[in-house]
Amino acid sequence: MANTILEVKNLVKYFPIKKGVFRKTVGWVKAVDDISFNIFEGETVGLVGESGCGKTTTALSILRLEEPTGGQIKFDGRDILKMKKDDMRKERKNMQIIFQDPYSSLNPRMKIKDIIAEGIKTHKIKGGRQVYKRVGELLELVGISPEFMDRFPHEFSGGQRQRIGIARALALEPKIIMCDEAVSALDVSIRSQIINLLKDLQNKFNLTYLFVAHDLSVIKYISDRIVVMYLGKIVEIAEKHELFNNTIHPYTRALISAVPVPNPDYQKERIILQGDVPSPVDPPKGCRFHPRCANATEKCSQSEPKLIEVKKGHFVACHI
Amino acid sequence: MKNNKKTILEIKDLKTHFFTEDGVVKAVDGVDFKVYEGETLGIVGESGCGKSVTAFSIMQLLDYPGKTVGGKILFKGEDLLEKSEAEMRKMRGKDIAMIFQEPMTALNPVLTIGFQISESLRMHFKINKTEAMKKSIELLDKVGIPAPEQRVNEYPHQLSGGMRQRAMIAMALSCDPILLIADEPTTALDVTIQAQILELMKSLLRDFNGSLIMITHDLGVIAEIADRIAVMYAGKIVEYADKKTIFHNPSHPYTFGLLTSIPRLDMEVERLNVIPGIVPNPLHFPDGCKFNTRCKFATNKCREEEPVLNELENGHLVRCWHSDKVIEEAKKIF
């Protein structure tokens, strides 16, 4: 495989819980708690997990849109957590994000040409008349007629808005794009249009994606490798076929079995997890999954399993 | 075999329109279907296809500017559209109950779970408060809520999303309804919680002798729970058949498009199929077949004349002029 483009090492992000008149910190939400993984150039890494597992926080921390509490993030060999604000802003030219909700992530008072041009102007990629020419090219690239560039976001449908969001991300010719639930809010027939568009753009520009989603079917389709998170921790990392054919972690197994498959003849054994995901404020001791795990032993409630490589490229955090 | 079953609900040419300032939105425009005793009918479609409006029309819970302007809703042979509001109120919750998508907004935040469940019990049956509370605890236990004696006195915000949905199911089942309508009951939940709720619903259905209408956009959910499926597009049913037929022999281009455009765990595809374009604006539906603007099989006939819901074989209805071409294409894939 190609070079490592992004290296996340021991990333930690805690959010303080403040209470009382003096806003004293009474506890921490351990959203992301010591995770490490790599992303190689040109690949798509799927980051999957349920609400509150820390997958979005991970994506935002990598961009420093949320300031990480600790750890190291190396992008192209440079430690971006040590960068000054100004340098970081320049670095973000190479790292873009597409948000989940195409309604709230576009400024309703700006014409779409200005939304897309904002980054081009800030980073001085093009100047003068060239700016809007570039905007036109970008719109065409994502399948929107450049004639519409004088319109406002509300004049577009959800799918078109997501295309505009993609054009905005592409405007800076980034190397890596974080897709934070980029297709989750879209209807089925629109979703496949956007997924195909993202794949085409990846081939065309050799983009790297970190694709954050809760939908395993989408993740399986789009990713090369998959990272599974549970309650702020990574429980399993593997190449996608390896992950589905040779699932090791009990949480991953339960997650895969929970996905409803649109085929009435598809036989499978469903593993039903008991209870809900515990609160990240006070996560269970030992393995965070042990209270819901059918195979949990004494050891699981005592010590936390480390993420170890069980097979080339297949990492699991489980005692069993 | 199915035709021997008793019909619980029959919808005939239902039309529900919204009279907005910009014009009339024909959200439901001529929908017909039947629900038999003990079966689960799945209604599937994308946002705005009219599936939820159909449900609200049956319950007659539509708000201004929505109005049912035509058709019949025959529940056990009686037309619900001719009933007065007082008569409807007696039926809602008792004969026909509903499970909503968002349990946080559907439950009253300032009343305890127990109060909300016993409210309908006390309204429809002559029982006192203590008995109603006792029954509520039983119901909560039945839907798998741990420590129901304690939970019954809690407020919705003290419950997790999955627990709230369980409480809402308990509430819907409280008066043993003949017909249960579930509007996207698992959409707001995480996958592992969704699996819990689906398994719960399946096990409850086994000893629940009423019928269920399951409304969802998720083809996976519908494949698990429904017996028969109606696919809706732009206010109309475009295909209607038993579950296996829909998934293995789709005959409407929209059904075919939906099935091939979703990434699936049971199939590997190089590239997803795409239904081009977007759902047309309900204020300006195209002439002829409503799907013609997005259909690769569309001909001049489709642009001029709206197809009727035509029976292909026993119980398999399709609204398309060119279903033979779709069947051919589907054979290659499914």
Image (cartoon, helix red, strand yellow):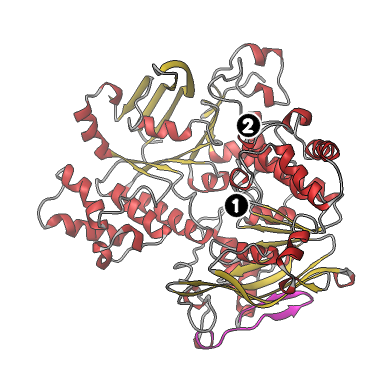
1 or 2: tag closer to the N-terminus: 2
Q: Which residue is mark 1?
A: B264
Residue neighbourhood size for the residue with mark 2, other residues' Cα within 10 Å, grouped as few (<14), some (14–19), many (≥20): few
Dot label at residue B158 = 2
Left or right: residue B220 versus residue A3 is right
Which is more toward the observer, B201 or B60? B60
Name which residue lies at 55% across and 66% down: B64
| Placement of the N terminus of chain A among the 4 image quadrants | top left
Name which residue lies at 34% across and 26% down: A67
Name which residue lies at 48% across and 55% down: A186
Left or right: residue B18 versus residue B9 is left
Which amino acid type is marked by label 2? Gln
- Give percent across and percent down for residue B148: 77, 31
- Give percent across and percent down for residue A283: 57, 20
Name which residue lies at 74% across and 58% down: B92
Start-end of magenta stretch: B302-320
Instruction: Name above or below for residue B131 compared with residue A110.
Output: above
